[in-house]
Amino acid sequence: MGKAGVQMLFRKKQEKKTYDKENQKPVLRCSICTGEQVAGFKDIRTGRFEEIRLIRTEKDLNGFKETYGIADEELSKEY
C-alpha cells in the first residue's frame, strides 16, 4: 500500500477552530446568478467578509459548521 493509501486509512480528526464571536458572524454568501456559495465570517463593525470555504455540497457545509462549532440558526445567508 502506497503512502496515499495509508493516509486514506488514517485520516486526522477534524480540528476544531474558533472565530471572534463578539466581532464576527458566520455567513453563507450565495450568488443569485451562478448559485455559488462561500462560507466565511463577516466583521460586524466593518462589514468585511473573510472567505473560509467554497461550498459545493451539503457535506462541505456540514464540515464548515462542525469545524467552527456553528449551529444552523447562527449561520445567515447573504445574496
Image: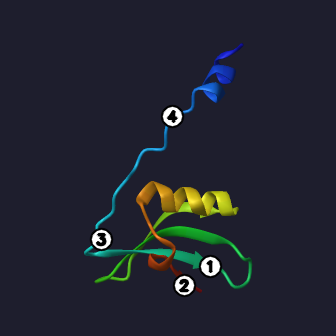
Residue at 72%, 13% (x, y): give it: 1
For the point 65% across and 57% down, which residue is it? 59
Residue contact at pointers 2 and 1, CB within 8 angstroms: yes
Q: Nearer the viewer, mark 2 or mark 4?
A: 4
Mark 1 residue element: strand
Amino acid, disc 4: Lys
Q: From the image, tell me which residue sits under label 1.
A: 30
The crowding category of the residue bearing disc 2, from other C-alpha atoms within 10 Å (few below 14, some 14 to 19, many at least 20), is few
- The mark closer to the camera, 2 or 3, is 3
Question: CA separation, marks 1 and 3?
Answer: 22 Å
| Residue 9 image label | none
Disc 3: CA contacts within 10 A as few (<14), some (14-19) or many (>=20): few
Question: Earlier along the polypeptide chain: callout 2 or callout 1?
Answer: 1
| Mark number displayed over residue 78 | 2
Give residue 8's position: percent from left, percent from top: 65, 29
Q: Whole-percent x and y of residue 22?
A: 25, 75
* Residue 42 location, quadrant: bottom left
Q: Residue at x 51, y 34 (%)?
A: 12
The residue carrying mark 4 is 12
Name the kind of residue labelled 3 in the image.
Lys
